[in-house]
Image: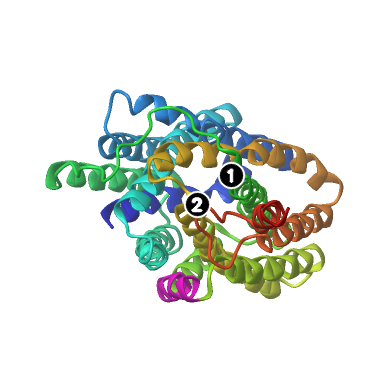
């Protein structure tokens, strides 16, 4: 819970300010912004390398190291308002964020019983949303009411994350692993559907993270304080909605939850392409964010089909897979944005359509021997022969 609080204190601060900071103080256009976001995703693409560090350092301790790095990178961001400076601090922050998230996901799946995982992940999202809400509230007060410079807001947000990491390091024991984790890369053919779902999820996420916020600032002229209010609305909704979604995934199953998510995203991305009213764009932004909690279903699906010893290695591999598209899309779509912003969102709708097709291949009751409907059909055909 504390780790889930510590991360958003930094990342939410970085995320809330980055559009305005990049445009207003670093002089970014869509091209520079897209390149920066692609650079931000490179550490995510290299997340598989974390498995090699686990040979020397325990997962729990290593997670705290990278949480500190996230805080330091965020704290330094405001002091380098230039194209190159922002590139460098973004990469530093991103190394901490992505490697920490890889380890946190692995630890949650190892420490939680399968029947409780969806609900626990929902509660962790809610806790993180509460921390983000606090961060956004302080940002709004600092920027809008006291006129605090963005550099000091970055410093405070990053510093609080480092403090939380220090508290966890000092106050908690090192918890033992239930199953000894493999200290090598694991890629298994029977996980193919999971890998594809993760890949498409990473691609779709970039449309929201990179271009939805950029649309608000560039097309509708939203100020940093207004963007922060949108983030706050998202957090309030997630505090109450995420635990409920976790329970519903446990009741409905992953197949139905993912189907609902991707049908909704097709509609949202199509609407983004043609929206001309600021308040409607803001509503779409909030609705878009609500669907993020449904991604719990991908994690619980993997937990149900995976060998428990594969979880640590697969956490890094899956984050790498999700960032294959993430490294390319921001920069490539940044150029496309200069030609036609609606085309960016229509391609996002097409990605959601592909994800919908993959979601329909998830079995109603996933298990190590029942990872996809295609595999089950082949197995049935073989038995019949």
Quadrant for the N terminus in the image:
bottom left
- Residue in front for this viewpoint, 88 or 172: 172
On screen, residue 282 above or below 304: below
- The spot of residue 331 in percent (x, y) is 71, 37
Residue drawn at the location 77% of the way across and 57% of the way down? 345
CB atoms of marks 2 and 1 within 8 Å: yes
Residue drawn at the location 23% of the way across and 45% of the way down? 163
On screen, residue 9 above or below 170: below
| The label number, if any, that marks residue 190 in the structure image | 1
- The spot of residue 238 in percent (x, y) is 46, 70
- Real-space CA distance between mark 2 and mark 1, rounded to the nearest whole angstrom: 8 Å
Q: Is residue 360 left or right of residue 251?
A: right
Which SS class for mark 2? loop
- Crowd band around label 2 with a 10 angstrom C-alpha radius: few (<14), some (14–19), many (20+): some
- The spot of residue 151 in percent (x, y) is 43, 43
Residue drawn at the location 64% of the way across and 72% of the way down? 260
Which SS class for mark 1? helix
Q: Which label's residue is closer to the chain start, 2 or 1?
A: 1
Which of the 4 image quadrants contains residue 258? bottom right
On screen, residue 230 above or below 215: below
Is 182 contained in the magenta span? no
Residue drawn at the location 38% of the way across and 28% of the way down? 183
**What residue span does the magenta drawing correspond to?**
237-251
| The label number, if any, that marks residue 368 in the structure image | 2
Q: Residue furthest right?
A: 339
Count of marks, rendered view = 2
């Amino acid at each position: 819970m504390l780790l889930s609080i510590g991360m958003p204190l930094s990342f939410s601060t970085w995320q809330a300010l980055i559009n305005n900071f990049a445009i207003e103080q670093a002089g970014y256009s869509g091209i520079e912004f897209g390149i920066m976001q692609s650079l931000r995703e490179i550490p995510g693409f290299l997340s598989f390398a974390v498995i090699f560090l686990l040979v020397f350092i325990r997962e729990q301790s290593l997670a705290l190291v990278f949480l500190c790095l996230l805080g330091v990178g965020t704290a330094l961001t405001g002091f380098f308002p230039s194209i190159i400076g922002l590139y460098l601090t973004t990469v530093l922050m991103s190394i901490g964020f992505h490697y920490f998230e890889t380890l946190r996901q692995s630890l949650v799946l190892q420490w939680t019983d399968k029947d409780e995982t969806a609900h626990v992940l929902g509660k962790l999202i809610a806790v993180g949303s509460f921390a983000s809400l606090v961060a956004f509230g302080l940002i709004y007060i600092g920027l809008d009411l006291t006129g605090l410079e963005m550099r000091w807001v970055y410093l405070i947000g990053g510093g609080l994350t480092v403090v939380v990491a220090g508290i966890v390091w000092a106050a908690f024991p090192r918890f033992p692993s239930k199953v000894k984790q493999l200290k090598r890369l694991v890629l298994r053919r029977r996980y193919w559907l999971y890998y594809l779902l993760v890949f498409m999820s990473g691609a779709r996420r970039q449309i929201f993270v990179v271009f939805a916020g950029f649309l608000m600032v560039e097309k509708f002229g939203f100020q940093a304080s207004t963007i922060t209010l949108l983030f706050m609305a998202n957090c309030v909704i997630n505090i109450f909605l995420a635990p409920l979604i976790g329970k519903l995934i446990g009741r409905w199953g992953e197949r139905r939850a993912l189907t609902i998510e991707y049908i909704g995203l097709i509609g949202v991305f199509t609407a983004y392409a043609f929206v001309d009213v600021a308040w409607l764009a803001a509503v779409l932004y909030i609705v878009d964010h609500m669907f993020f909690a449904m991604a719990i279903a991908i994690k619980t699906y993997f937990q149900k089909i995976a060998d428990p010893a594969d979880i640590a290695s697969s956490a890094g591999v899956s984050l790498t897979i999700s960032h294959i598209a993430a490294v390319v899309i921001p920069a490539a779509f940044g150029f496309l944005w200069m030609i036609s912003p609606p085309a960016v969102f229509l391609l996002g709708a097409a990605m959601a359509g592909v994800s919908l097709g993959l979601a329909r291949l998830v079995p109603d009751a996933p298990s190590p021997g029942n990872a996809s409907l295609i595999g089950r059909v082949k197995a049935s055909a073989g038995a019949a022969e």
